[in-house]
Amino acid sequence: MTTTGATTLNLAYLLDHQARLTPDRPAVVCGPQRLTYGQLNAMANRVANGLAAIGVKPGQHVALTCPNIGHFPAVYFGILKAGGVVVPLNVLFKPREIAYHLRECDAVAHICFEGTPELPMARMAHEALREINGCQHFIVMTLPPDKPSPIDGVRTLHQLMQDQPETFATHPARPDDTAVILYTSGTTGQPKGAELTHLNMFANASITRDLFLPAIEGRADGHNTMLITLPLFHSTGQTAQMNAGILGGMTLVLLPRFEPGPVLQTMIAEQVNIWVGVPTMYWALLQYVKANTVDTQAVAAHIRLAASGGAAMPVEVIRAFQETFGVRILEGYGLSETSPVACFNQFQRPSKPGTVGHPLMAVEVACVDDNDRHVPVGERGEVVIRGHNIMKGYYKQPEATAEVMKNDWFHTGDIGVLDDEGYLAIVDRKKDMIVRGGFNVYPRELEELLMTHPAVSLCAVIGVPDERLGEEVKAFIVRKPERDASEADIIAWCKDRIAAYKYPRSVEFRDALPIGATGKVVKRELRTA
């Protein structure tokens, strides 16, 4: 608990402050739903009052499963206002993955969107809760809000908020208190919860907002509109867009799903001047423009800033996008553990294609060898980072934390090169992580799942080049004697048990896998086969 006179900083102050300054300004647009800053703040206050009423205490963890709709920021800031820790979960998780995360984060409550017939999020979460001890409260958000719960006996978010006051005194958290736990596998293995503090998140949102300003300043009314197609449960959508946008008093236009046509139509209709995507999204927009009649001038009339992260952007895509829409793409780099932004190609300086720019203010980046010695300019080394953006550590995993936090630097597992002007290029990965369309896929997690299949004797998972997604997931499998399973069987089995972006799209059966002297599968031989 906060002591009298201690410095306080709750990330929810972002919304409190903006609601005082511009209560009537549009804050969130999602289809027909339009919320002003005053209305969004009132919703968050009712959520906070509802959580307090059911016994959620400051410091306790509340999981949130929600797509890009207006409920996400309302619930997110409501949890923070109540002094809770937000644990955003991927909306694509299946029951076994939901159960793992709820158990690992010690959630006392889970607020979950009802989902769709194709992706029944609430029903899958309810199934997962049967395996969990300690998650006392399950709350389903429905659309429309007053719609009955799809699960008998389960409280809805509307019922939680019903008759609750629209005012709430935001809990005075300390800057180093945990605000959010973002689950990531780091560089390999099972997902780990990166504990990000109120200061981590506030500073990253503030500096990111400031990075955007030179590109968008000069708009006559001083009001900017940001389109968010990256998922808000992801670190970039959450910090560099939602939080930075609210700090800047911007209007956030939310799209639950990325589809090129609706994205371009929304850019025109809402006069969007800021957008952040991953390389595959930029590629998809260009392909759509080639195949369809699009008023690119209407898009270009408003868009002032296009940013990208998550994976390396092909130079050809950068060139084509600039020619088509007349806007420069600024690439950045970061990880969940770095809140997330660590480097950015900033507007005031020329971009260097193939680089992710310079470190943020008060963030240091270096490249080191295996002995943690800084390598000379122009030479490859592991990228290490230190500054206000580095996480507290992995929740309940001191050994994993110690593995990445060495000599006061966070070790990313990425291989980079710093040039003589301080631009950083990411050239490789130290570990085996696959980046599929901007989403991280960790081979070990999928390998452990595959090893539970009755026909699998041995397996290895790698990323293979893919024109659209950057990398695609491929599994190599040795079958058990007298056991049979086709490629389609394996893919369908995985698809039922793991998020859609993780399951293998191709399977190759072999009599044996290459094994090294230490008994491990030599994946480099699979990649070059």
Image (tube, grey):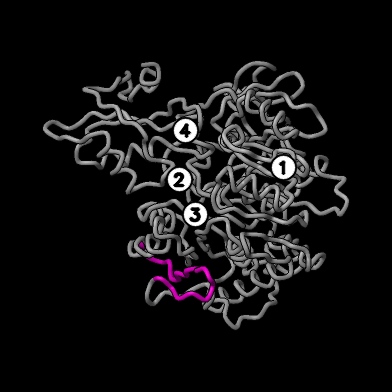
Q: Which mark is residue 89?
A: 3
Disc 1, SS: helix
Mark 3: amino acid: Leu
Q: Which mark is residue 299?
A: 1
The Cα–Cα distance between marks 1 and 2, rounded to whole angstroms, is: 39 Å
> Which label's residue is closer to the chain start, 1 or 2?
2
Residue that mark 2 sits on: 191
Mark 4: amino acid: Met
> Which label's residue is closer to the chain start, 3 or 1?
3
Please provide the residue range marked out in magenta. 132-150
Is residue 26 inside the magenta stretch? Answer: no
Q: Nearer the viewer, residue 171 or 322?
A: 322
- Residue 50's place in the image compared with 223, above or below, is below
Q: Nearer the viewer, mark 1 or mark 2?
A: 1
Mark 1: amino acid: Val
Q: Is residue 406 visible in the rendered structure shown here?
A: no
Q: Quadrant of the N terminus?
A: bottom right
> Which label's residue is closer to the chain start, 4 or 1?
1
The Cα–Cα distance between marks 3 and 4, rounded to whole angstroms, is: 20 Å
Q: Residue at x 69, y 54 (%)?
A: 243
> Which label's residue is closer to the chain start, 3 or 4?
3
Q: Residue at x 16, y 34 (%)?
A: 484
Query: Residue 56's x, y, as percent?
Result: 54, 72
